[in-house]
Amino acid sequence: MKAKLLAAGIAAVFAAPAMAQSSVTIYGIADAGVMYVNNGGGDSKVKLVSGIADGSRLGFRGTEDMGGGYKAIFNLEARVELDNGKQQTGNLSSNQTMALTEGLTYTLPAAAGGAATAAKLLAGVQAALNPAVNVNINNALFDRTSMVGLVTPAGAILLGRMYTPGYEVLAAGDVFESGTAAGWGGIVGGTGGLLTAGVSIRSDKSVQYRIETPNGVKAALMYGFEKSGYVGMDKRTWGANVRYVANGWDVGLGYNYGTDQVGEKGLVTTTLAGSYSTGPWKIFAGVHEQKNPNSVIIRYAMDTLAPTFAGFGTTLGPILSAQTRAALQRNFNLDAISYQAGFHYRMGQGRVMASIVRQDDKRADASDATQYGLGYDYNLSKRTDVYLIGAYIKNENDGQYAIGAASASGGFTAKPGMSSKGVQIGMRHRF
């Protein structure tokens, strides 16, 4: 009898895959538009931009229902830049920032090249901190998401590259839904643009546990192993969130903690944000605290520049290296709080969107910025919409924030304290 039961059990296990229901979906977003912007300097005022309201993408999503509340799932999502067909991009503005080398000067003796060589060295360091590509620097095929997971009656376990818990809360509370010239993230971070990012959007090499309850409570817990984080350089990361999504509410609290390459405290964020829908109105509000005393980019930059300093010999080289590290440590330091408030108002097949964002820089130079955004989004069909967005950023002190888009950072104005203003008109198709 026992032998028969064992044989039946083995047969059931091997038969399960054949009986399971599985499916794979190919999906994506094609989004592009024209942008007029005034950032000063030699930066072009009219641009064709991919991914204004939403980053253009191509994705594959699959599920296998194994019964009993168990499902195997996967998601692979690739970035697509419609303007050139590539998977990498840089700042929308061609202007550079000197904020990351502010206060840095080199003095070289005549034997080492004197003032001319010192000026050339400084220019080289400044250029190294203004890379042409700053999104998907590893040129990954599935840069947006690459994940496999198991859904169980007690929650879901996911492994791979995924959105962080803290960013999920920020995105859910963003009036412009993480895109356009008026997106909340446009002025979140330091004066060095994406090199001083104020939120970790995704994390490599991570495992995540997620749960949803029938009463609208959702929660997530994530841990990132070595070489995790948004650019895959953190020693380790972790994060958590809890959200309530029901009865018109979508509110949450999220926390992310990152470290640098040797485990020192890195980018740490706390986000409280959400929205409330009633009738044609959807009201948004949020606050986002961001601190980064030890950016992973500092060690990355110093390793990249090490051969340059070594070329000045064993006496002068270490002095130049120490001066550079001190400047980067000072200028990469991030300590700020961001506030956002705004609304949607639906009118037929369209909606009006408006928001105000304030980046309150707590550092000594107080490079604050205020962003104003107004837009209209009209649905041509269930899958296709067109939009018109206007934004204005008022920079203060060393602030050089420039209006951006979902797929790319705006970059910088020509000079510190200069405002950035522009209009975007585009089309988005979901398939």
Image: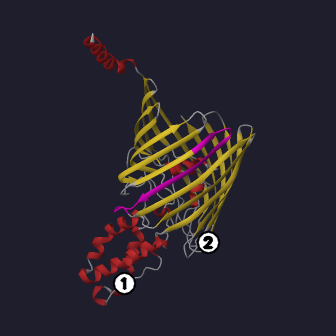
Whichever of callouts 1 and 2 sits on the residue coming sooner in the sequence is 1
Q: Amino acid at mark 1?
A: Ala
Left or right, residue 91 beside residue 393: left
Residue 390 visible, this angle? yes
94 drawn magenta = no
Q: For mark 1, give the secondary structure.
A: helix
Residue at which label 2 appears: 396
Counting labels gives 2
Q: Position of residue 358 (x, y in %)?
A: 64, 63
Q: Position of residue 288 (x, y in %)?
A: 58, 58
Q: Position of residue 190 (x, y in %)?
A: 52, 66
Magenta segment's dominant SS is strand
The one of 107 and 92 positioned closer to us in this rendering: 107
260 drawn magenta = yes
Q: CA distance from mark 1 to mark 2?
A: 32 Å
Colouring used for the render: secondary structure
Q: Who's the residue at 56% across and 66% down the image? A: 336
Q: Who's the residue at 58% across and 40% down the image? A: 217
Which of the image's four quarters has the N terminus? top left
Q: Position of residue 86 (x, y in %)?
A: 43, 48
Q: Can you tell which of label 1 and label 2 is closer to the viewer?
A: 2
Q: Which mark is residue 116?
A: 1
Residue 320's place in the image compared with 34, above or below, is below
Q: Where on the picture, by quarter, is residue 124?
A: bottom left
The one of 9 and 40 positioned closer to us in this rendering: 9
In the image, which residues are magenta?
Answer: 243-263
Q: Where on the picture, by quarter, is residue 299?
A: bottom left
Residue 23's place in the image compared with 297, above or below, is above
Q: Where on the picture, by quarter, is residue 131?
A: bottom left
Q: For mark 2, give the secondary structure.
A: loop
